[in-house]
Structure formats: structure tokens, C-alpha cells
Image (cartoon, rainbow, N blue to C red):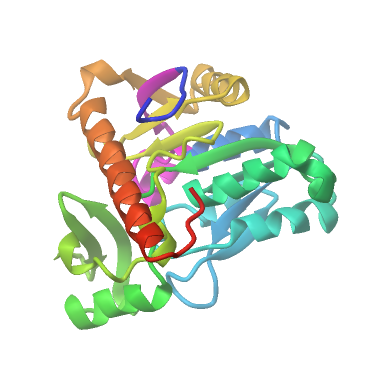
């Protein structure tokens, strides 16, 4: 149960070449939300869209596939997508909403569905929730410090950010520059240190790069609704899949990282309790 409850795990990627070009790994979030929108499964999606400041996302109520595509790629700083769900329902009048979020955001979303009295206009309108694997998230100022001070580059010329093989990576002016992850410790959001969820266990569909080859994503189909929509996208040729037992490094690496986050969160939570500090878990 280290990965949470799920029905099936697969390695997958979007078949659309344009999505592949701009996506982080397999482009699953973009492909799945776009498919759901085009098929009328959702009427719009709250995503982490671009802002006036490069690499600093802001919530976007995407009403077209092009708008969803504009939000492709992982941003390693916080985008308050949950706050925009009310906007999607109240201002846009959406009855079927999709969204993407990291584990802590999904905990908040599911709580609104468990305690619906204060959000009764919203809880039953969430038709598709896609979760992203997340070990930690950084304040935007931390990203600027990594890139400018530690990597001697600039956010203005950064084309892509990624985490893999023990490093925080950027692609800038065609060059790959890596920063050991140990040098990023202490810069993450404080709440990340007590979060036990790596694989977005409360999503309809969870996805991330760990476990799959380059250019592909690992996908955990969790709920009936999530599995149904994902399988429909595969049948329609929007997404292609491989069995997880046929790819390397496979689920063992994902399970190792997920367990490591749980162990680290428990250790930090215990430490905070000993100091008399409140913890949510």
C-alpha cells in the first residue's frame, strides 16, 4: 500500500507529437485533460498556466485544448489551483470540472468532498482529478536562487526544468546544467517535510516520470472514473501504454521513493511533536 490504492499501473505517453515536444515526460496530464475536454467529459480544467513572470505559474481555467497545452510542463513552484476551482464553477458556470494538482492540494480537494456543506456548489462538479508525483515544492525565490546563484545561469534563458538522477536540472541555451539535490534541501516549502504522500494517492489518476523510461510516464489508475477516462483515451489512440513489468526501472524505484517520503515525514512529524508543535497527520 506504499503507493496508495490503485487498480493498475502502466507506463504511458501521449501520441500527439506537439504534446510530446512541450511536455515534461510522457505528457499524460495534457493529453488526458485535453481528451476529456474534447469528449465533453469535462467542460473546462483548472491548470497551472503561464504568468507574466517566466516560470512562475498561476491558475488558469482552461476552456480549450490549446489553453491546456499552454500549461504543459512541470513547474517546481506552487500554483494555487485549488483556489481557482471556485472561479471555474461560479464565474465560468462549469458543471463538470477537471484539474491537476500535487498531493497536498488533492488532500484539500478531497476534504471538500468529504465535508461538502461549505462547498456544496463545487464538490459534486469535480469530474476528473489528475495528481502529480511530488517529493517537494519550492518557493519561487528558491528557484531563482538555484538558477542564478548556484547554477550561474538565468531564469530568462531557461527552457526546461526537471528533477532526475539525483539532481535538479535546467536546460538553458541548449545546455543541460545539474545541481545536486542535496544542495536544494532546506529551500523547500516547510510543509513538504511532513507530507507522507509522494504519488498523489487521492487522485483519480496519478502520474510522474519515476519508474518509466525517458519520454514516458508512470500512471496509476486509481478510481473507477479515472480508470474509465484513461482507458477511453488509450482506446481512442490519444495515449499509448506499456506494461510496467516490461520497463525499467519499474515500480520498485517508485515504491522506494514513496516509502522514503513516508519515513521522512514520520520522522519530522515526531520531531515536531516532541517540540510541542502541531502537525496535521
Q: Is residue 190 left or right of residue 248?
A: right
Image coordinates of residue 143 in percent, x first then y, are 33, 73
Q: Nearer the viewer, residue 273 or 216?
A: 273
The answer to whether 73 is drawn above or below residue 275 in the figure is: above
Q: Is residue 221 left or right of residue 44?
A: left
Q: Quadrant of the N terminus?
A: top left
Q: Is residue 247 left or right of residue 233?
A: left
Q: Is residue 229 left or right of residue 24?
A: right
Residue in the picture at 71% in, 38% down: 114
Residue in the picture at 52% in, 16% down: 235
Q: Quadrant of residue 181?
A: bottom left
Residue 215 is at least partly visible in this image? no
Is residue 16 a member of the stretch shown in magenta? yes
Q: Nearer the viewer, residue 271 or 83?
A: 271
Q: Quadrant of residue 146?
A: bottom left
Q: How many marks?
A: 0
Q: Quadrant of residue 127?
A: top right
Is residue 24 a member of the stretch shown in magenta? yes
Residue in the picture at 23% in, 39% down: 214
Image coordinates of residue 17 in percent, x first then y, are 40, 40
Q: Nearer the viewer, residue 184 or 191?
A: 191
Question: Which contiguous range is marked in magenta?
Answer: 8-28
Image coordinates of residue 43 in percent, x first then y, are 74, 41
Residue 15 is at least partly visible in this image? yes
The answer to whether 250 is drawn above or below residue 48 in the figure is: above
Residue in the picture at 49% in, 77% down: 53
Image coordinates of residue 23 in percent, x first then y, are 40, 48
Amino acid at each position: 500500500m506504499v503507493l496508495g490504492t490503485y487498480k493498475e499501473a502502466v507506463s504511458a505517453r501521449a501520441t500527439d507529437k506537439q504534446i510530446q515536444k512541450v511536455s515534461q515526460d510522457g505528457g499524460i496530464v495534457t493529453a488526458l485533460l485535453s481528451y476529456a475536454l474534447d469528449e465533453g467529459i469535462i467542460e473546462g480544467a483548472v491548470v497551472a498556466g503561464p504568468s507574466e513572470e517566466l516560470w512562475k505559474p498561476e491558475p488558469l481555467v482552461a476552456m480549450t485544448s490549446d489553453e491546456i497545452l499552454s500549461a504543459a510542463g512541470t513547474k517546481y513552484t506552487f500554483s494555487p489551483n485549488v483556489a481557482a476551482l471556485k472561479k471555474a464553477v461560479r464565474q465560468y458556470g462549469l458543471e463538470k470540472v477537471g484539474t491537476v494538482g500535487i498531493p497536498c492540494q488533492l488532500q484539500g480537494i478531497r476534504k471538500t468532498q468529504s465535508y461538502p456543506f461549505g462547498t456544496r456548489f463545487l464538490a459534486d462538479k469535480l469530474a476528473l482529478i489528475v495528481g502529480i508525483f511530488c517529493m517537494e515544492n519550492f518557493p519561487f525565490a528558491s528557484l531563482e536562487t538555484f538558477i542564478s546563484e548556484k547554477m550561474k545561469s538565468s531564469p530568462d534563458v531557461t527552457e526546461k526544468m526537471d528533477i532526475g538522477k539525483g539532481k535538479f536540472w535546467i536546460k538553458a541555451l541548449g545546455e543541460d546544467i545539474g545541481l545536486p539535490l542535496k544542495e536544494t534541501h532546506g529551500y523547500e516549502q516547510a510543509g513538504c517535510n511532513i507530507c507522507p504522500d509522494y504519488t498523489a494517492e487521492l487522485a483519480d489518476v496519478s502520474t510522474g516520470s519515476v519508474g518509466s523510461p525517458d519520454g514516458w510516464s508512470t500512471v496509476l489508475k486509481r478510481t473507477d472514473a479515472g480508470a474509465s477516462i484513461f482507458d477511453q483515451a488509450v482506446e481512442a489512440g490519444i495515449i499509448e501504454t506499456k506494461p510496467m513489468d516490461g520497463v525499467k526501472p519499474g515500480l520498485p524505484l517508485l515504491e522506494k521513493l514513496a516509502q522514503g517520503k513516508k519515513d521522512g515525514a514520520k520522522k519530522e512529524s515526531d520531531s515536531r511533536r516532541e517540540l510541542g508543535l502541531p502537525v496535521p497527520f
